[in-house]
């Protein structure tokens, strides 16, 4: 049994789950189809699925199959926000930078205590997250809290329609063998910089911090 092959398959499926190619609640392909797709044995495929289950990315139901557990992607009717290839993902990310930098700037102008608490709650959840699905959920909650604090319903709606598929975990965040604590620390520090600028009511710093975080996020996504 090849553990490295199982990890490779798990990372490929995890990428599809996290970026929304396999939506929340969707049934993963059957073992037989995965065997055919990856040219691997059933034993290796089962190990890959077990790994995804242990990471909190899927739930396996006996006699039914494995289902994705990531937060839901955009609702029906929002196909214009779908990103089905690397080029479209880059465009979506650029759109996200545009709306989220402005959201952070507006949020910093006069944040309410309720909005600051929501941002802090999401930041704490992100710091405490251990499983990829928890990280995606907490990360998106933080960005949504910032958009809510902007006071602009259109910015918030746009982010909601993009959904948690906007949060893309690089492969190194999926594999225990490759996970780099420094990477997770950098991500957390970037979010804290945004929160700090909003709390200090500094719109320029908040927008710059959000932009820096999202640019760094894109770089991490494309890193080998």
Image (cartoon, helix red, strand yellow):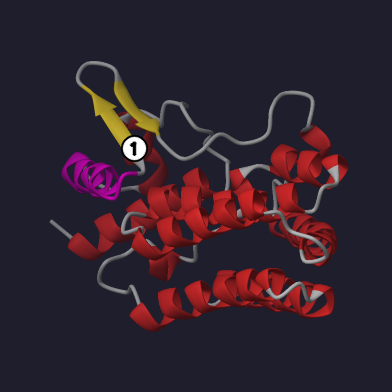
Prevailing secondary structure of the magenta residues:
helix
- Residue 220 in view (yes/no): no
Compared to 44, does 178 lie above or below?
below
The residue indicated by pointer 1 is 58
For the image, the number of numbered tags is 1
Q: Residues within 10 Å of mark 1 (few under 14, many from 20)?
A: many
114 up-or-down from 124: above or below: above
* Residue at position x 77%, y 79% in the image: 208
Choose top left, top right, bottom left or bottom right for residue 142: bottom right
Q: Percent position (x, y) of residue 10?
A: 34, 52
User: Which residue is most to the bottom?
Assistant: 182
Residue in the foreground of this view, choosing between 76 and 8: 76
Does residue 35 lie above or below 194 as drawn? above
Which residue is pictured at 47% across the width and 27% down the height? 26
> For the magenta stretch, what is the residue range?
42-56
Left or right: where 36 falls relative to 149: left
Q: Is 20 situated left or right of 133 in this image?
A: right
Residue at figure coordinates x 56%, y 54% from the top left: 117
Q: State the quadrant of the N terminus.
A: bottom left
State the residue at coordinates (40%, 70%): 172
Numbered disc 1: secondary structure: strand
Q: Residue 104 placed where, x, y %?
A: 76, 64
Q: Position of residue 45 (x, y in %)?
A: 25, 44
């Amino acid at each position: 049994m090849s553990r490295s092959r199982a990890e490779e398959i798990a990372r490929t499926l995890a990428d599809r789950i996290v970026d929304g190619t396999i939506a929340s609640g969707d049934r993963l392909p059957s073992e037989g189809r995965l065997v055919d797709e990856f040219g691997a044995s059933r034993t290796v495929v089962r190990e890959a699925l077990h790994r995804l289950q242990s990471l909190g990315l899927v739930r396996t139901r006996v006699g039914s199959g494995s289902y994705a557990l990531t937060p839901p992607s955009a609702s029906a009717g929002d196909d214009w926000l779908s990103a089905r290839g690397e080029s479209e993902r880059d465009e979506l990310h650029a759109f996200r930078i545009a709306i989220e930098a402005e959201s952070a700037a507006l949020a910093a102008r006069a944040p309410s205590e309720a909005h600051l608490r929501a941002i802090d709650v999401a930041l704490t959840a992100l710091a405490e997250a251990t499983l990829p699905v928890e990280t995606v959920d907490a990360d998106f909650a933080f960005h949504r809290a910032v958009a809510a604090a902007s006071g602009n319903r259109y910015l918030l709606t746009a982010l909601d329609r993009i959904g948690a598929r906007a949060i893309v975990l690089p492969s190194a965040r999926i594999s225990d063998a490759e996970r780099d604590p420094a990477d997770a620390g950098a991500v957390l520090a970037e979010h804290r910089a945004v929160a700090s600028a909003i709390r200090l009511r500094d719109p320029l710093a908040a927008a710059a911090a959000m932009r820096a975080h999202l640019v760094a996020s894109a770089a991490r996504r494309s890193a080998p």
